[in-house]
Image (tube, helix red, strand yellow):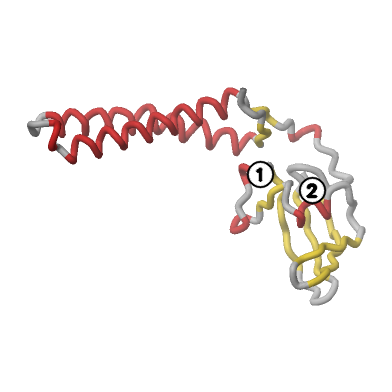
Amino acid sequence: MSEIKYYSEEGLQKLKDELHQLIVKDRPAASAAIAEARDKGDLSENAEYDAAKEAQGLLEARISKLQDLIANARLIDESKIDTSKVLLLSKINIRNTKNNMKQSYQIVPESEANLKQGKISVTSPFAQAFLGKKAGDTVEVVVPAGTMHFEILSVER
């Protein structure tokens, strides 16, 4: 049995879009590549055919994995998120109390984490330190270099 994972609407849509791309465009292209390689003669010594079959196998495995993820996905109802405290899908604006540097992050399911986009995994120690806290709270985050202190400036949805 597959594990149930939680997604934002945006994250689940990305999975569905990728699955659609694989089925509608990539699967027919893989079949065409196999047919083209097959037409080139002896299959026992045809490296192009072997490569095309292997690529098709990887494609089908990815399609199967995505179908499984989508079937077991649970959508997080963003309208019911409490904005008085930091929870999954909260957008937080924080200030490092040592250097006054301000940063913004959104706490997302692990599968949607992307630090470049300011999306940190709810399972990360950094995000865990903020969960349940409110705007105005000071939070201690233990990092390899020591302990950092942040003030939560605001919590948004």
**Residue 105 placed where, x, y %?**
71, 55
| Residue sitting at x 80%, y 51% | 128
Give the side of residue 96 with respect to residue 63, left or right.
right
Q: CA distance from mark 2 to mark 1?
A: 19 Å
Residue type at numbered disc 1: Glu
The residue carrying mark 1 is 110
Q: Is residue 59 left or right of residue 64?
A: left
The quarter of the picture where the C terminus appears is top right
Q: Are marks 2 and 1 in contact (CB under 8 Å)?
A: no
Query: Tag 2, which secondary structure?
Result: strand
Residue 112 at x, y = what percent?
A: 62, 44
**In the depicted structure, whether residue 123 falls above or below residue 101:** above
Q: On residue 156, which mark appears?
A: 2
Q: Quick one: 132 or 94, which is closer to the camera?
A: 132
Q: Earlier in the sequence, mark 2 or mark 1?
A: 1
Residue drawn at 88 percent across, 47 percent down:
132
Q: Residue at x 77, y 53 (%)?
A: 127
Residue 81: which quarter of the image?
A: top right
